[in-house]
Image (tube, rainbow, N blue to C red):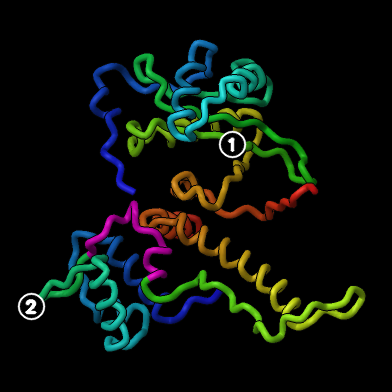
């Protein structure tokens, strides 16, 4: 499973904000930390802002502040703002749907449909995983790994 | 989904939450909790579970969270040995907390208690399996540090 760059950046940002909910974090700080352009990050933060996950604080020393509930907000909630990882698989073309005689090799649509079932299974598992992990749980995981590696 | 701040705090004056082995007299409340959540009153099933997992059973645990006589939740599990070559592990197959007692650590206490029971038997791995649609319980287990196991559940229709 590969998430798009914007989605990953949104997850990094949401976790940064959720880790310090009382603190205003400047977009430039996150951009530096994750080595992305501030312009690119600004677009991501606007989407998070529109969804009510972060609030912009204007003025000198302004930035963004977490506005969600880290114990309720899941990775899927963030991912869903940027991409659909559970889009229905493309059905094979109707014109190609001819009945295959027994013993004949499989028609292209039959192979595509069978592969689609397997890919849909993977999508469903990925979706369930992302939906079950909240930002708070993710922050605990980061902490546990840091303790283990430290 | 929105949960009200649990009422367990409000009932703190009624005594501390105690996790203990389930007794026959708890069964009515356990059935009530389960029926309230699942919509099914499975009296015969729970009587059977009590018989198989009630206090004193080797490698099997049926624990309840008792707050001044009110059962707030329960957990059931057992040690499973060498399934498909897997070394013994602690297996949790049911955990439930009254909706009005959630978000107050009851589930965490129950899971800690059954984990301690498994540890005493020399088990160092905790496992469970549940529907991937069951986001509430999945999120709970995730919050307790559980990750995907190196197994894949499979099924098929038996024609």
* Main secondary-structure element of the magenta-colored stretch: loop
Looking at the rendering, which quadrant does residue A83 occupy? bottom left
In the image, A105 versus A39, the foreground residue is: A105
- Whether A150 is drawn above or below A104: the answer is above
Q: Badge 1 is on which residue?
A: B92
Instruction: Identify the residue at horizontal 49%, vertical 76% (top origin).
Output: A3
Dot 1 alpha-carbon crowd within 10 angstroms: few under 14, some 14 to 19, many 20 or more: many
The x and y percentages for residue B101 are 34, 31
Q: Secondary structure at mark 2?
A: loop
**What segment is highlighted magenta in the picture?**
A66-80
Q: Nearer the viewer, mark 2 or mark 1?
A: 1
Which is nearer the eye, B76 or A37? B76
Above/below status of B146 relative to A58: above
What x and y, as percent, mark residue B120? Answer: 61, 28
Q: Would you identify the image quadrant in which residue A33 lies?
A: bottom left
**Residue highlighted by disc 2:** A60
Q: Give the left or right position of residue B36, taking residue A66 as reference.
A: right
The chain letter under disc 2 is A
Q: Would you say A29 lies left or right of A150 here?
A: left
In the orientation shown, which residue stands out farthest toward the left?
Answer: A59
Residue B21, magenta (yes or no): no
Membership of A75 in magenta stretch: yes
Q: Residue at x 67, y 32 (%)?
A: B79
Disc 2: CA contacts within 10 A as few (<14), some (14-19) or many (>=20): few
Q: Does residue A150 appear anywhere in the picture? A: no
Relative height, residue B145 to residue A130 (above, below)? above
Residue A93 horizontal side relative to residue A82, left or right: right
- Rendered-image quadrant of the N terminus of chain A: bottom right
Q: Are marks 2 and 1 on the same chain?
A: no
> How far apart are labels 2 and 1 at the CA level?
53 Å
- Expressed as whole percent of the image width and height from the top left, the position of residue B94 reads 55, 34
Q: In front: A44, or B3?
A: B3
């Amino acid at each position: 499973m590969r998430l798009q760059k914007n989605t990953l950046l949104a997850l990094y940002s949401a976790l940064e904000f959720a880790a310090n909910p009382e603190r205003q974090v400047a977009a430039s700080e996150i951009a530096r930390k994750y080595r992305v352009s501030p312009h690119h990050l600004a677009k991501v933060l606007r989407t998070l802002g529109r969804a009510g996950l972060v609030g912009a604080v204007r003025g000198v020393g302004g930035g963004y502040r977490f506005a969600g509930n880290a114990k309720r907000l899941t990775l899927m909630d963030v991912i869903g703002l940027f991409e659909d990882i559970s889009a229905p698989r493309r059905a094979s073309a109707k014109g190609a749907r001819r009945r295959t005689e027994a013993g004949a090799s499989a028609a292209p649509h039959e192979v595509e449909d069978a592969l689609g079932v397997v890919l849909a299974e993977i999508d469903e598992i990925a979706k369930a995983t992302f939906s079950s992990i909240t930002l708070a749980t993710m922050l605990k995981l980061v902490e546990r790994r840091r303790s283990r590696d430290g | 989904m929105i949960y009200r701040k649990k009422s367990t705090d409000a009932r703190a004056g009624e005594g501390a939450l105690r996790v203990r082995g389930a007794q026959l007299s708890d069964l009515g409340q356990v059935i009530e909790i389960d029926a309230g959540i699942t919509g099914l009153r499975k009296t015969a099933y729970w009587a059977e579970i009590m018989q198989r997992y009630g206090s004193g059973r080797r490698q099997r645990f049926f624990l309840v969270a008792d707050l001044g006589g009110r059962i707030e939740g329960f957990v059931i599990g057992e040690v499973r040995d060498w399934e498909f070559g897997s070394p013994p592990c602690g297996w949790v197959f049911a955990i439930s907390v009254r909706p009005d007692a959630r978000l107050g650590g009851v589930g965490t206490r129950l899971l800690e208690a059954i984990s301690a029971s498994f540890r005493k038997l020399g088990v160092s791995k905790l496992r469970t399996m549940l529907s991937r649609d069951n986001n509430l319980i999945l999120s709970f287990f995730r919050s307790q540090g559980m990750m995907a196991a190196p197994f894949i559940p499979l099924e098929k229709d038996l024609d």
